[in-house]
């Protein structure tokens, strides 16, 4: 059965209408958040006065193979994002809107206060409205670690940067209404920035979109700053959400239908679209997501700051020891093993094919035998590469687990982890 329409189909169907002709919708927020995963360093200025249309940016990127390689490398993320960015940029709806204030910061510091992965941009929807978009976690190791740091600090560097960014955008566009959107960690940043905004900026905020982003500790949500934006928050989670179930959220949220499965539903390109709306899953979140929400949030509050820090440091020490900056580069050696074996196999088969064509019957029989041996060798080599990958994964999990438990040396932590495992087991 064919997949249900998604935001790619929406761009094709709704792309001829400008935002003046048809108002901004939840699907538009998802489109801009997905476009935000493309790296635009050098194509758009960090200030708000110099603005450039999306179709101009796409034109520059598509002008050469070198530009495409430079700007369309999304690592382990959905490889369809660059294609989607280009398609959306060629429509009237998204292509002609102006982009400005592009900022991208990645810094692998030594502690929570300096580790940051942050990116944002502002689009001018019309002469009265802007939309500030915060990027979610990208392919960088530091980005993944900063997600975990949400459990350690009252304010992580990306949240501070988001609050400052929104304040600056609001001050520059003094009379514009403001929409703020983010996917994954970007959704968390959107809420945080709006809650921390000064009253002059906050009163002009129309809507805050959190698309499957992690939440906050309950005391943070209960603060006066957050309660002032509660009614303007539109949170969406796929029905098998995992990332969005980390930490607490406001009670009012919507559940999206998805063409994906489990963690892959986090990808906005899997979310189903009905006309100009995101499809609502009428039965709400699945039991697994609800259990994750319940168990994780009960567990995390039981740990003190030192326990959380020890566990997270143990988890990421192995990743950082590889001295790789992105998740994709960590698996590069394994990928190269596969590619090398396949290239060698292809060259050998071409050689055998040529020999087959230019030989007598006896030679042809010999060539077929060589081909069979070559196929066997290719399978063996690929299996070795696959075994290397699996071995690395198993070894990594074992080392992380051992390092985490040995570093913690805390009976209470062990009891909590056992409790979590038991509750998940009983919910299956």
Image (cartoon, grey):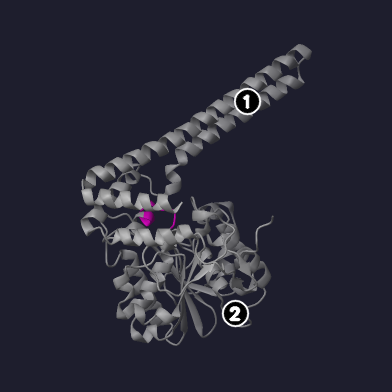
Location of residue 149 (image quadrant)? bottom left
Taking the spot 34% from the left edge, 57% from the top edge, the residue there is 148
Location of residue 364 (image quadrant)? top right
Above or below residue 176? Residue 183 is: above
Taking the spot 64% from the left edge, 82% from the top edge, the residue there is 21
Above or below residue 369? Residue 238 is: below
Q: CA distance from mark 2 to mark 1?
A: 56 Å
x and y, in percent, of residue 397 in the image: 37, 41
Residue 402 appearing in the image: yes
Residue 139 drawn in magenta = yes
Task: Determine crowd level at label 2: few under 14, some 14-19, many 20+ residues with C-alpha closer than 10 A.
Answer: some
Which residue extends farthest front? Answer: 426
Q: Nearer the viewer, residue 191 or 175?
A: 191
Locate the N terminus and report the quarter of the image it occupies: bottom right
Q: Nearer the viewer, residue 60 or 141?
A: 141
Which residue extends farthest top? Answer: 362
CB of mark 2 within 8 Å of CB of mark 1?
no
Q: Nearer the viewer, residue 424 or 77?
A: 424
Return the disc, 2 or 1, that comes first in the chain's sequence.
2
Taking the spot 40% from the left edge, 52% from the top edge, the residue there is 424
User: What residue range appears in magenta?
Assistant: 138-144
- Left or right for 402, reference 340: left
Residue 119 numbered mark, or none: none
């Amino acid at each position: 059965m064919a997949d249900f329409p998604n935001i790619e189909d929406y761009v094709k169907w709704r792309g001829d209408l400008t935002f003046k002709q048809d108002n901004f919708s939840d699907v538009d927020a998802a489109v801009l958040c997905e476009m935000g995963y493309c790296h635009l360093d050098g194509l758009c200025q960090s200030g708000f006065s110099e603005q450039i249309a999306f179709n101009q940016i796409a034109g520059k990127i598509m002008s050469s193979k070198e530009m495409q390689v430079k700007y369309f490398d999304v690592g382990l993320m959905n490889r369809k994002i660059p294609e989607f960015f280009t398609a959306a940029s060629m429509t009237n709806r998204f292509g002609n809107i102006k982009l400005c204030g592009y900022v991208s910061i990645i810094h692998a510091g030594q502690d929570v206060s300096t580790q940051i992965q942050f990116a944002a941009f502002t689009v001018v929807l019309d002469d009265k409205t802007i939309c500030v978009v915060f990027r979610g976690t990208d392919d960088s190791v530091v980005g993944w670690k900063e997600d975990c740091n949400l459990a350690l600090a009252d304010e992580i560097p990306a949240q501070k940067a988001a609050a400052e960014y929104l304040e600056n955008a609001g001050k520059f566009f003094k009379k514009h209404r403001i929409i703020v959107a983010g996917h994954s960690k970007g959704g968390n940043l959107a809420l945080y920035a709006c809650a921390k905004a000064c009253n002059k900026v906050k009163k002009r905020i129309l809507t805050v979109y959190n698309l499957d982003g992690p939440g906050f500790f309950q005391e943070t949500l209960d603060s006066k700053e957050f309660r002032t934006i509660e009614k303007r928050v539109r949170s969406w989670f796929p029905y098998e959400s995992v990332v969005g179930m980390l930490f607490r959220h406001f009670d009012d949220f919507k559940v999206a239908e998805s063409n994906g499965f489990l963690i892959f539903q986090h990808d906005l390109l899997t979310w189903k679209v009905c006309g100009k709306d995101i499809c609502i899953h009428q039965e709400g979140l699945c039991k697994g997501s609800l259990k994750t929400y319940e168990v994780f949030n009960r567990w995390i509050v039981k740990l003190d700051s030192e326990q959380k820090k020890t566990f997270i440091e143990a988890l990421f020490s192995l990743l950082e020891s590889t001295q790789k900056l992105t998740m994709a580069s960590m698996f590069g050696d394994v990928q190269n093993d596969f590619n090398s074996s396949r290239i060698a196999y292809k060259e050998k088969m071409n050689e055998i094919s040529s020999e087959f064509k230019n030989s007598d019957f006896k030679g042809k029989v010999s060539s077929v035998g060589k081909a069979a041996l070559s196929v066997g060798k290719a399978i063996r080599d690929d299996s070795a590469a696959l075994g290397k990958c699996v071995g690395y994964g198993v070894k990594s999990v074992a080392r992380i687990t051992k390092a985490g438990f040995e570093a913690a040396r805390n009976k209470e932590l062990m009891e909590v982890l056992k409790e979590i495992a038991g509750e998940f087991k009983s919910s299956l």
